Amino acid sequence: MHAAERPFAGLKVIDCASFIAAPAAATTMADFGADVIKIEAPEGDPYRETYHAAGLPVTERNYPWELDNRSKRSLCLDLKQPEGLDVLYRLVREADVFITNLPLPVRDRLKLDYDSISALNPRLIYASFTAYGEVGPESGKTGFDATAYWARSGLMDLVKADHTAPPSRPTMGMGDHPSAMAFYAAIVTALFSRERTGHGSQVRSSLLANGLWSNGIMVQGQLDGLQFAPRPPREHAANPFANIYRCADGRWINLALSSEARQFGLLMDALDLADWQSDPMMRTPQDCRDHHVDVIARFDRQFLSQDLSHWRHRFDQVGITFGVIGVMADIDADEQMLAAGALVPFADGSGLTVNSPFDLVGVDKIAPRRAPKLGEHSEGILREAGFGQSEISRLRELGVLRGQ
């Protein structure tokens, strides 16, 4: 499919956001052809410096920035000056989508709130992302995925190894990236509505709402008044067929028997448990659950007798549902990830990146372009918007416009 046929070709998106969900939603729009203009303050988006955080690999390649801001153009503006705000307003008048996750008090102070922005362009989609929502006692509170998505939703407590362990710490962006997909869906829904009505609208999403949705099954049980038992250690899990097991080489496998009635015998044979039919603890799936502690111990001994590759081959042969518990060193050479297009090359050949997690059959996404340098496209964007050289020069003299 030609670039002009991509669904968002010709769509102008202003990304006035940072850290991570809202910009990642804009990145997905860029994947499908949108022209995304990244608005940055003179000091730059603070997300640019995240790759230097303690505990992360020491590198000069800004890999978080490359992932979440690829294929965008950067415009560096000082929005605290009225002239900078005027520039943004001129861009908004010709834009289709305005994305922001600035704290609500900051939006009010800078006049980037919905009423101020929507008055400039009745067809604009104003996409607002917050930590805790836009009404209520904590609506103005700042937050990140670790605090608003993982901690507040109960996920951080529920996914710990057992009830005696401390809450589990998430990795960077684990809540942001799925939240970005929900936010993207909200924007696209609003664009579809605009096609029918001719009018723009405001869409909202938050880390809190997405965390609750991610944990929705457990949350719904809580809302229905159910009592959840404390999570037992792995060795005492109630179901031996839905558990993790360590192999001889130190790798782990996640067993998830999808149909016990059909696959039980296949599993026992694949595990080389030849005596399972004569063992009263293991004759049926229910026997195994009734004696789950002893059965898990028996499974542990079997898994520890062979490397991961052995068990992977045995289970694949008979169609047992399982998952390899991956480590980062696996990713680069994962044949399935590459074949399925989950990993794609940068347009300049500088390596691979993570693809946005869906496709339109027959539509080629753009080849991911490198993320912009601070203010890399400032002057070009203004020229496209009708700014003359004298205006651009004056904005530079005032310190409103930075970059190239």
Image: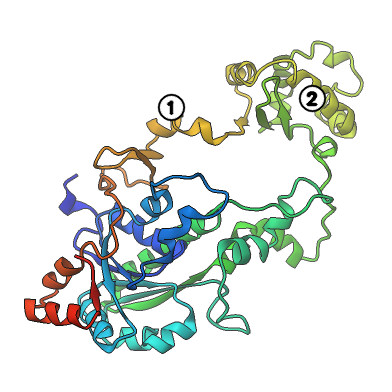
Residue 289 disc label: none
Q: Quadrant of residue 294?
A: top right
Coordinates of residue 30 in the picture (x, y in percent): 29, 56
Q: Which residue is at the front of the view, 322 or 338? A: 338
In the figure, 358 relative to 40: above or below?
above
Q: Earlier in the sequence, mark 1 or mark 2?
A: 2
Residue lying furthest left in this view? 389
Coordinates of residue 126 in the picture (x, y in percent): 36, 76
Residue 121 at least partly seen: no
In the figure, 141 relative to 169: above or below?
below
Q: Which residue is at the front of the view, 94 or 2? A: 94
Whether residue 4 sits left or right of residue 253 in the image: it is left
Whether residue 135 sits left or right of residue 345 in the image: it is right
Which structural element holds mark 1?
Answer: helix
Coordinates of residue 242 in the picture (x, y in percent): 73, 36
In the image, what residue occupies the spot 85% across and 22% down? 282
Q: Quadrant of residue 147?
A: bottom right
- What amino acid is found at the position of numbered circle 2 in the picture? Asp
Name the residue that disc number 2 marks: 300
Q: Which residue is at the front of the view, 246 or 195? A: 246
Residue 402 at least partly seen: yes
Crowd class of label 2 (few under 14; some 14 to 19; many from 20; radius 10 Å): some
- What amino acid is found at the position of numbered circle 1 in the picture? Glu
Name the residue that disc number 1 marks: 335
Whether residue 2 sits left or right of residue 19 in the image: it is left
Whether residue 256 sits left or right of residue 200 in the image: it is right
Quadrant for the N terminus in the image:
top left
Q: Quadrant of residue 292?
A: top right
